[in-house]
Image (spheres, rainbow, N blue to C red):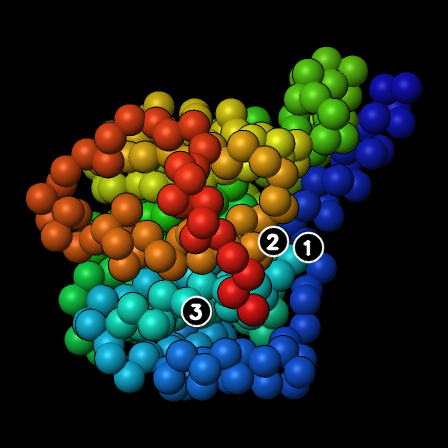
Amino acid sequence: MLVGAAAAGATIGASFLHPGRRALTPSAISSANNAFREVGAHSENFDVKTSDGTLLHGWKVRPANANGDWVVLFHGVADNRTGTLSYAEMLRHGYSVVMMDARAHGESEGSMATYGWLERDDSRSIDDALFASNEVGHLFYLGESMGAAIALQSAAVDPRVAGVVAEASFANLREVTYDYAGLEISPLLGKTLFRPATMVALAAAEKEGGFKAQNISPVKAVAARPFPVFLICDANDRRIPCRHSRMIYNATAGPKEIWVVPWRSGRIRKNSKVASSHFSSGLPVNPARFKQRRAFGSKRQGLSSTDCQQIQPFF
């Protein structure tokens, strides 16, 4: 049994660093361009070379009524930049956006994904290139799943980032490994019955990736710098349960709010305008509030009736 667990762990560790690439197809590009035109925005290619020489590919998208603020969007694992297309709604409110393929994803270079270890330096390179080529009023990050974890870790090391919206982020790499090893039934399985596989998987990932699992941690990131954080999670998500967002919330040193959506809706951004509407309404991403460093208030268990009315299909 232990031999089988070790073999499974080694396989999981290797696949963890090498997720499948979702191709950026002509059809996907056409859909994106149509979405941009629908909101009166214009896109251009945005290529960035990182500090280790990896070339990242993406787009800069500007609305006709740009307000001077920018939002960098971070997609989930095994996805590409078009995975954040539903957030194009915020272009209607004047925000310009950066949509990049993360390293080892889409059209970007890179041999492995490290869930924040290398990507936080990539984010700084993206920010450097953005500030060098554009006037930037305020800079915000918005990400989901892997992208949310990267956004939080990146913001901790770049003081230019005014705030982060993070949907379904993991708390730290070790903790989320327990959930995956628990087969979406219970993390206790990953901590007990399947613990040998979990330990081998992490050791294999650490060896190949050149990092320590404890250093890939949004929880540590939000405690390191007091930037505003708005967390969103699905109460019924078994892949990355809400306890991850609660752990991040509890560790956040800056202004914070958490929304626990009480029904299973998959990834919230696929079904709603929640994130984009709150970028414009000041909950949580309002530059004036960020500058004043006001707290976002108490934890909100689910959405109010008014908020629920805002949840409508975007595309």
Q: Are marks 1 and 2 in contact (CB under 8 Å)?
A: yes
Residue 279's place in the image compared with 293, above or below, is: below
Circle 1 Cα neighbour tier, 10 Å, few/some/many (<14 / 14–19 / ≥20)? some
Say which amino acid is labelled 2.
Val
> Which tag, 2 or 3, sits closer to the chain's start?
2
Residue that badge 3 annotates: 88
Q: Secondary structure at mark 1?
A: loop
Measure the alpha-carbon separation of dots 1 and 3: 25 Å
- Residue at the location (84% across, 33% down)? 7
Residue furthest top as drawn: 192
Residue that badge 1 annotates: 19
> Which tag, 1 or 3, sits closer to the chain's start?
1
- Residue at the location (68% across, 64% down)? 21
Q: Which mark is residue 285?
A: none
> Which tag, 1 or 2, sits closer to the chain's start?
1
Say which amino acid is labelled 1.
Pro
Residue 42 position in % (x across, y down): 38, 86
Q: Secondary structure at mark 2?
A: loop
Nearest the eye: 233 or 109:
233
- Residue at the location (9% across, 44% down)? 292
Nearest the eye: 277 or 43:
277
Q: Which mark is residue 77?
A: 2
